[in-house]
Amino acid sequence: MLTDYHCHILPGIDDGSENTEMSVKMLGLQRQQGVERIIATPHFYAHREKSVDNFLKKRDNSYKKLIGSEVDLTNVFLGAEISIEKGISELDGIEKLAVEGTDLILLEFPYTGFKDWMPEEVHNIACEFRLVPIIAHLHRYVSIFSKEEMEAVLRMKAIFQINNEAFAGFREKKFAAKLIKNGVRYVFGSDCHNIAVRSPNFDILKKEFRKKPEIIEASDNIYEKHIL
Ligand SMILES: [Fe+2]
């Protein structure tokens, strides 16, 4: 089941879809591209939110706006893209941000450079709550992390998420292809935010692997392995 593990399709909750109309268009595009399972992952920045529970209320309200629209919500699941901040593993209720019905949780490294506490926070979330971290769009950090820092990240017990757009670039494509070849656990996502420059883009991925569908299937199959 073609799965988008990372997207910002919920209306009016982050810098993704601006309103219900845009969400309907984004979901429509995903379906046209053959995406059958969608994990909605609005940004969660601990320092901007009152609490996890408050964020979850906002997320529910956002999702409810899609109910009753013409959009097909079959196999749309709720999650979040949690920015790793110092101390995040101790935030009350952080485990509630896991992808609903699974032990998967999508975590995003900041773009400010690598710090030793970052993998520690990831490790603590995983161990404390028995969750499996998905590290968002790792290829984006090739020019931010040193080789050694990237190796430290890759040693973590985690699944690594690749944005489809990585296959449209040179350096990021090379990095993503190497990840896949080296046998790490990976999943794909559109990380779509709108219907303009960051729109649903599974067409890129399908074109890239038209002769190797098993590469995409390996990503899709991760979900089933993590259903609780
Ligand atoms: Fe994202």
Image (cartoon, rainbow, N blue to C red):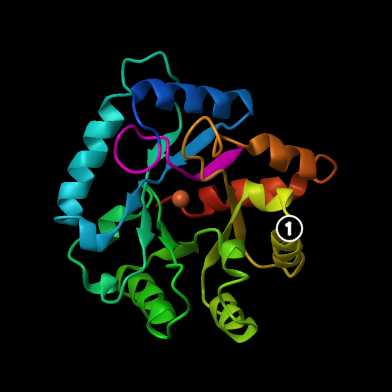
Is residue 10 part of the magenta span, yes or no? yes
Quadrant assignment, res 141: bottom right
Is 79 placed left or right of 140 in the picture? left
Residue at (42%, 86%) from the top-left corner?
116
Establish if 86 lies above or below 35: below
Question: For the point 56% across and 41% down, which residue is it?
Answer: 3
State whether label 1 is within 8 Å of ligand 1. no
Residue 102 lies, in percent from the top left, at: 40, 51
- From the image, give the main secondary structure of the stretch colored magenta: loop
Picture quarter with the N terminus: top right
Q: Amino acid at mark 1?
A: Lys
- The answer to which image quadrant residue 90 occupies is bottom left
Task: Kindly identify which residue carries mark 1.
Answer: 173
Q: Establish if 73 lies above or below 69.
A: below
Q: Which residues are magenta?
A: 1-16
Q: Position of residue 105 (x, y in %)?
A: 40, 58
Decide if residue 33 is on the left or right side of residue 83.
right
**Residue 209 is at least partly visible in this image:** no
Q: Residues within 10 Å of mark 1 (few under 14, many from 20)?
A: some
Q: Residue at x 30, y 76 (%)?
A: 86
Q: Position of residue 213 (x, y in %)?
A: 77, 43
Front residue of 36/179: it is 179
What residue is shown at x 39% (from left), y 81% (from top)? 120
Q: Position of residue 114 (x, y in %)?
A: 47, 79
In the figure, is residue 170 to the left or right of 148? right
**Residue 56 included in the magenta stretch of the image:** no
Q: How many marks?
A: 1
